[in-house]
Amino acid sequence: MSNSILSLTVREHAVLDFVRGLTARNGQPPVWHEVWGKFGFTSPGEAYFFLRDLERRRMLILGQDRERGIVLIGRETAGGEAGVTV
């Protein structure tokens, strides 16, 4: 396991698990509003900045032009390949 994953907070792990689970179940990642609602952020913007922090830690990539543009890094996705948008 990489040092980046080991240094994640409990909440960061929970958000990544939520994104992975929804992606596997629905075949597409959650929108930022779903992350906001699930984890009780005070605004959609707070959820976005939280996801941006995970992007800086190289856990995921946020697509600039798509609401469901969350790309997981280093794990298999529902599309069958690591690091692809599903």
Image (spheres, helix red, strand yellow):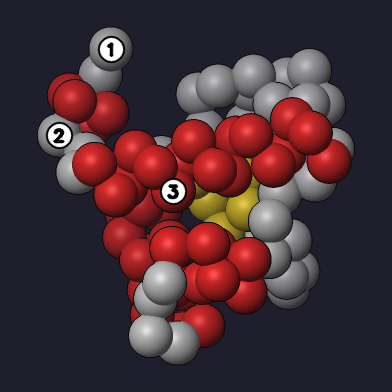
Which quadrant is the C terminus positioned in? top right
1 and 3 marks in contact (CB < 8 Å): no
Q: CA distance from mark 2 to mark 3?
A: 14 Å
Mark 2 residue crowding within 10 angstroms, few (<14) / some (14–19) / many (20+): few
2 and 1 marks in contact (CB < 8 Å): no
Q: Residue beneath label 2, please?
A: 7
When asked about the image quadrant of residue 47, the answer is bottom left
Q: Is residue 13 left or right of residue 15?
A: left
Percent coordinates x, y for residue 22 in the rendering: 69, 42
Count of all numbered marks drawn on residues in the image: 3
Mark 3 residue crowding within 10 angstroms, few (<14) / some (14–19) / many (20+): some
Sequence-first tag of 2 and 1 = 1
When asked about the image quadrant of residue 80, the answer is top right
Mark 1 residue crowding within 10 angstroms, few (<14) / some (14–19) / many (20+): few
Sequence-first tag of 2 and 3 = 2
Q: Residue beneath label 1, please?
A: 1
Q: Residue beneath label 3, please?
A: 15
Sequence-first tag of 1 and 3 = 1
**For the point 82% across and 26% down, which residue is it?**
79
Q: CA distance from mark 1 to mark 3?
A: 18 Å
Is any part of residue 85 visible from this angle?
no
Is any part of residue 54 visible from this angle?
yes
Q: Is residue 81 left or right of residue 20?
A: right
Residue type of the residue flagged with mark 2: Ser
